[in-house]
Amino acid sequence: MSEEDERELLRRLEPLRLELWPVFSEAGFVGEPLAAATELRDPAYYLAAGDVIGYPIKKGPDRGKWKIDEVASPVIFFSRSLPDEKGELRSGHFWAETEAAGDNARTGGKPVHFLRVVRELQEMIKSRYRKSSPVRGVSYFVGPACARSGRALREEGRKGEPIRVYR
């Protein structure tokens, strides 16, 4: 996704009443409502569709900060597509756990609103984004503005393969 594709995505997700959370936050942090005018600075975020559950990081450089429990919370992980040192756009991705962990009879599963948000996001990407030619068996969805620009695309990772968009 290019920056223009991200703006369009945020505009389309705004009516779904999601909250934007950073990957690591301070204790007591409250997610901001997602809006089309939201400025994305970090390489990854969580899109929350309800109350989140977190835990403190006890070791490493982010010690003392809080991280959201992706399995227990109704969140979608959003890793942005960012340019590398050569100016090529690297692949990003969405990830969501749609089934609650543990005994579903007692936990009740994920909220219906969250499942609806995931379904709408999937439908939007499948209907508006273009598919790429397979790269090692994986097809990517490329944003419409990014596909029109003809920008060089690469898969994420040290030896990312080039991504070619179907015309």
Image (cartoon, helix red, strand yellow):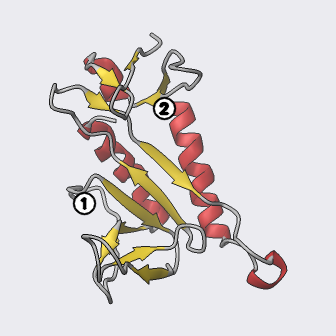
Q: Estimate how packed mark 2 is, as few (under 14), some (14 to 19) or many (20 or more) residues with alpha carbons within 10 Å.
A: few
The residue to which callout 1 is attached is 38
**Residue 123: x, y in percent?**
59, 41
Residue 93 sits above or below residue 37 on the image: above
Residue sitting at the far bottom: 28
Residue visible at 29% across and 55% down in the picture: 36
Quadrant in which residue 84 is drawn: top left
Left or right of 162 in this view: 136: right
Secondary structure under badge 1?
loop
Residue visible at 68% across and 69% down in the picture: 112
Camera-side residue: 97 or 112?
A: 97
The residue to which callout 2 is attached is 128
**Residue 82: x, y in percent?**
26, 39
Quadrant in which residue 163 is drawn: top left
Residue visible at 61% across and 68% down in the picture: 113
Camera-side residue: 115 or 106?
A: 106
